[in-house]
Image: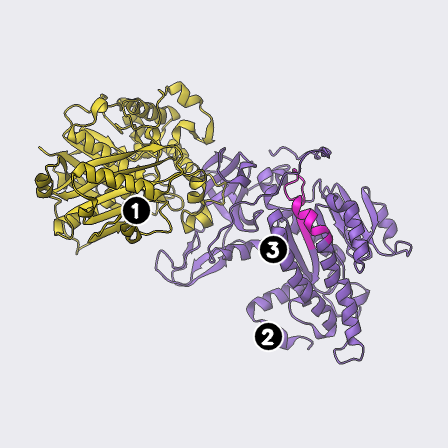
Chain colours: A purple, B yellow
Amino acid sequence: MTEPLLKPKRKNPLARTTQPLLPPSARSRKAHGLTLAAATGRFMLQCCGECGRYTYPAREACPNCLSPELAFKDAPTGGSLLSETRIEVTSDPYFREHMPWRTGLVQLDCGPIAVVHLHGDCGEPGSRLTLSLQLDRAGQAVFFAKSVSEVPHMEDDPQWREMTADPKHRRVLITDGRSPLALPLAQVLKKAGAARIFVGVTDRWKPFDEQASLEAIEGIELVDLDLTSERSVQDLAMDIGAKVEILINTADHVRPARLFDAGAANAVREAMDHTVMGLMRLAQAFGPVMRSRGADGAAGAVAWVNVLSVHGLSNAPQFGVHSAAHAACLSLSQWLRTELKPGGIRVINAFAGPLDTEWFQTVPPPKVAPKAVADAVLDGLKRGLEDIYVGDVAKDIEARLFDNPKAVEREAGQ
Amino acid sequence: MAFSRARQSYEGVVLAVPVTVPYQRYSIETAHWWMGKALRALAEGAGISHRDFDGFSVSSFTMGPDVAVGLTQHFGLSPRHIDHVPMGGAAGIVSLRRAARAVQAGDADIVACVAADTNQVDTFRKTLANFSRFAQDASYPYGAGGPNASFALIARHYMDRYGATREDFGKLCVAQRDNALRNPYALMKKPLTLEQYMSARAIAEPFHLFDCVMPCAGAEAFLVMREETAVSLGLPFVRLLSAIERHNAFAEDPVQVRGGWVVDRDELYGMAGAAPGDVDFVQTYDDYAVISMMQFEDLGFCAKGEGPDFVRQHTFTVDGSFPHNTSGGQLSVGQAGAAGGHLGLTEAMRQLLGTAEGRQVEDAKLGLVSGFGMINYDRGLASAAAILARAS
């Protein structure tokens, strides 16, 4: 059984903050097939298109038949432990700070042998294991093996914590309390053990529907935050920036506009100011301090979540402005991911279809309940995902984009 | 395969002038400096100019960005046979095999086989981090334990399967230390007891400190030529009777329990006209004692799985029932990168030339040297072995 992770002690303000380090991150281009799978929580390996055998490590030709057709394909996640070790000494600076480190050799049910990170609860050689592909602190895909059955507190395993962004004992900032996502997010995060939840609210004097419910959650704190004001964002970062381990950007601004309407440019400018520029201001204010706190104890800074519209991936004309703004947010978030990488902070994008809220009133179902987005974000944090697709519409668009992005474009708005 | 034929004999091929450039734990010099020292010692030992070496075979992990041909200019050589053998622990025997065929065919008369590596303060970490594509993709990111972690997985499995114990590994390590104390070149100068071995700090279970080689800087080298060349130069020599190499054998074994020696050992002994029991000493590639044990099995000294028992029944010092790694091996001499693959050869040459001084195996006529190397991902891929004999 894993030792439960205790609430970290208050940090000595005079103590130096441990600087973040990353595990070895060099990979071949082919190996990023695993990154693609890990980003969305899938388990995929190269599988030969001619002889059908799975192969690993990533290759350019099948060792059985030399076919170059080695696409990554979903694979069974079971395996058996062949051998294990506990590494006590390494010359790598990142792992040196995490010794001892348990690894094993696993015979995958689909054939190949994999060196894996081993969860502390895995049994002796011979044990059955369940594998997953995870993104480590460098953002690179690695195999992680756990025991087949659930064990109490298994999410607290220190090696597993390095592969995830579990909110337990961490402090979270939700950037827009007026978003319909704020309340369900706060509720699920509280339940998952978040130490404190800050919720940004513009114009605090203006009441809003969910204010009372939010304030009723223990450990929550409403704070002034106007994403359209650089001053406001900077002020909040000065105040709580060093206390935010997970930032969840829920900012959105949905207003219908037609491209050829007079004044459409104003709608675009306003939407961009709330979303893209809002994200930019957040990044500038909160990014540096989060990046510097990536190794700040067992509950250091760990993740930045953007809730984006799936239409940012391919424009939906009925929400053209919204789509364009979120496309820009996506590009900015990729940039942010690179900037936060040295801190080991993962940037997670949760792509949702239209939410079941007033601004999407005219859109036919299926629509996404805000609670579903909150659950998906929590799941993504706990599993260490990078791309999350929430709801049937988002999943449909994801699959169709993978299949043929031009078809998605031609069929949009029909 | 139907179209394979018996390999040709190595008759007439000899080795001369074993050279060891004394190791240093850390060096501020480059690999080239160590190669230069080795080449000079070869030339002085042979009594000729280094320009007379018309063959040059080099092994090194740290000679980058140079390649072998670049080194000819660096050292003022003008060879007609050139080789770069980046095969770690198998490099010595592979170099020897290629050099042997070159001198037999007349492509070269004298081949200088040189292995050298430096060890600057961060060299070892950099070598591990850039070792191979599979290691970068699929083993180094898992705790960055390097070969210690990879071989720990192999050792743990071997122990589980064949009943080897840490004491068995310790017995080999302790005997090698005893041998090393008689070798002025060995970096390890203090005796080692089994108690010290057992209680040393853990590195990667089941390995503890004395299971692991110490990376260092150094060079090993020797000359390969035809017998008549050695005679005309007036050089004492040893004969090459047979040699084998095999790579990526038994890929289907889930965990490595054997190496490629098994495939070719009948030829190894057949060409030498000898049986395992005939050799007077054995130099295995001892990056870890478990790998030496595997070599005892795979080279036919005992059956698969009997390695632990074999170790319990024998003594392994110079004067033991099974003289093994008489120099002290890499475990006690130090691992000078790729030179670790040549250490067994230079030591075997000294034993057969009768120049091993305080560690001389009595009346050594026949010696077996084995090489093993390149843990590209989860196992050592290269294995090689040679049988050498006293000139007469």
Please state which amino acid type lies under the numbered disc 1: Ala
Q: In the visual, does B333 lie left or right of A46? A: left
Q: What element carries label 1?
A: loop
Tag count: 3
Q: What element carries label 2?
A: helix
A132 or A298: which is nearer to us? A298
Q: Where is mark 2, residue-wise?
A: A407
On the rendered image, what quadrant is the N terminus of chain B found in? bottom left
Whether residue A401 can be seen here: yes
Q: Which chain is mark 3 on?
A: A
B319 or B105: which is nearer to us? B105
Point out the stretch of residues depicted in magenta: A285-305
Q: Where is mark 1, residue-wise?
A: B249
Whether residue A109 can be seen here: no
Please state which amino acid type lies under the numbered disc 3: Thr
Q: Which of marks 1 and 3 is in front?
A: 3
Please, is residue A194 above or below residue B364 in the view?
A: below
Q: Where is mark 3, residue-wise?
A: A338
Q: Position of residue A259 (x, y in %)?
A: 74, 78
Q: In the visual, does B288 lie left or right of A107? A: left
Q: Which chain is mark 1 on?
A: B
On the rendered image, what quadrant is the C terminus of chain B found in? top left
- C-alpha span from label 1 to label 3: 42 Å
In which image quadrant can residue B344 be found? top left
Q: Position of residue B99 (x, y in %)?
A: 19, 47
Magenta stretch: includes residue A299: yes
